[in-house]
Amino acid sequence: MTTGATAAAVVTAAGLAVITLVVLLGWIAAPHQGASLPGVLRTAAALWLVGQHVGFTFRGAGRIGLLPLGLVLFPGALLWRAGRWVVRAGQVRHLRHVGYAAVSLAVPYALLTGALALASRSGLESSSLPQSVACGFLLSFVAAGLGGARALAPWSQLIRLLPERPRSVVVGAGGALAALMAGGALLAGISLAAHVREAAALQQSLDPGVIGTVLLLLLQIGYLPNAVVWAIAFSLGPGFAFGTSTVVAPTGSALLQLPAFPILAALPPGLHTAIPGWIEPTVLTLPYLAGGLGGLLLVRAAPVLALDAAPVWGLACGAVSGVVLGVLAAVSGGPLGDGRLTAVGPSAWQTCLVSALEIGIAAAVAAGLANYVSLRRTGALPARRAPAASSGTGYPADRAAHAAGAQPLSSGSPGHVIYVDPWAGEPSPDPPHPASPSALPDRALSQRDRA
């Protein structure tokens, strides 16, 4: 427990030191009449809480919950390294003990995060203490746990610890999500590049200065993961909102006046088509392509399934992907005050449901086809039997021969001869006249006696 508490204190102190330096640069470069050094420290503590995804409530303005996901990467990386250090310093040798090491770091880290939430409060803004403790614990537990597990074994060995079927679902969902992230990043980058002139003009109108421009650029970089998640929601179909009664979707968008933030220049206000008509089908096929990739990876990561089982696991892959995307949609948006910007970002439940259906259906079809091909290659599926040659009478040749009185082959060994007529009960053809069934044993007996 002492090792975990030490690591939590070091991570908090290091993170606060870096953020305080950035805030000091902005405080020195910008006019700061009425601002004091304690206010700078409270601002740094507030930004550190933003890195834990903790929102704020401003007096007279409402709650601010639209937070940059990119800032979460900074404390997450520090906690990752801290988790590795705790595992090595505590001489943890088994993966089942990594959870205890992560808890030993997460509990003191959550308490420190709650203490910062209380210390950063002022007459203007305040943060929620329960949310600060919960977000600090969740972030530190996940990041430190993954870092500690990675310190003991590579990812390939860690994923093999799962049973075969759950492992294949995880691999398939990971591939589908990675494809969606790449497609969302490409879509967001194209949109920003198409409106780069508007963004530059908006930034010049703000006149932030040299240091202010750098800080504004860093803030926009922090919001890039949010833009990627929004682009994924856009490709899924439901899109996202930027205010009440607004929508941005492939079929069109309706927006009101937007805040003066350069990155928002990619969302021109008013009623208009979101994208050209010829690009819309390409954008809407992105989740299906991602689901198809997930289905192929699912079959490849596990042994050959039953013919009807692969589509079911493909649907499970879509369900897992939908849950993850729903969580990302929830944390990528949030309110921007009490006015019309209380609803900003994609809907979590719509993103979860639509992505689970689209990715799941595509993954089920791809997994079923890939599994069928694997079954044929391994010979698990019986080959189709060629139709028997006809004797010209409408009956198979072997039946016609039997009806004509063909004798069975005898091995020469004594014993009973059993005849099986596969066409028993069907009318016999008219041209041949088969022998009476009562004569078959006598005829066979005479052949054996002659031999």
Image (cartoon, rainbow, N blue to C red):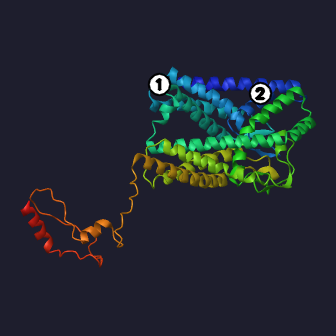
Q: Which mark is residue 92?
A: 1
Asked which secondary structure carries label 1, the reply is loop
Residue at the spot x=46%, y=45% of the render? 165
- Mark 1 is surrounded, within 10 Å at the Cα level, by few (under 14), some (14 to 19) or many (20 or more) other residues, namely some
Residue 343 position (above or below residue 31): below
Q: Residue at x 49, y 22 (%)?
A: 90
Residue toward you, 193 or 61: 193
Left of 327 or right of it: where is 44?
right
* In the foreground, 76 or 301: 301
- Nearest the viewer among 109 and 218 is 218
Give left or right: position of 81 versus 117. Answer: left
Q: Residue at x 71, y 31 (%)?
A: 48
Instruction: Tell which circle, 2 or 1, labels the residue nearer the N-terminal end.
Output: 2
- Residue 212 versus residue 194 in the image, above or below: above
Residue 450 is situated, as x and y percent measured from the top left of the image, at 7, 62
For residue 174, side relative to residue 60 (left or right): left
On the image, the x and y values in percent for residue 409 come to 18, 60
Amino acid type, callout 2? Leu
- Label 2 sits on residue: 41
User: In terms of secondary structure, where does tag 2 sit?
Assistant: helix
Q: Amino acid at mark 1?
A: Val
Residue 309, percent across and down? 45, 53
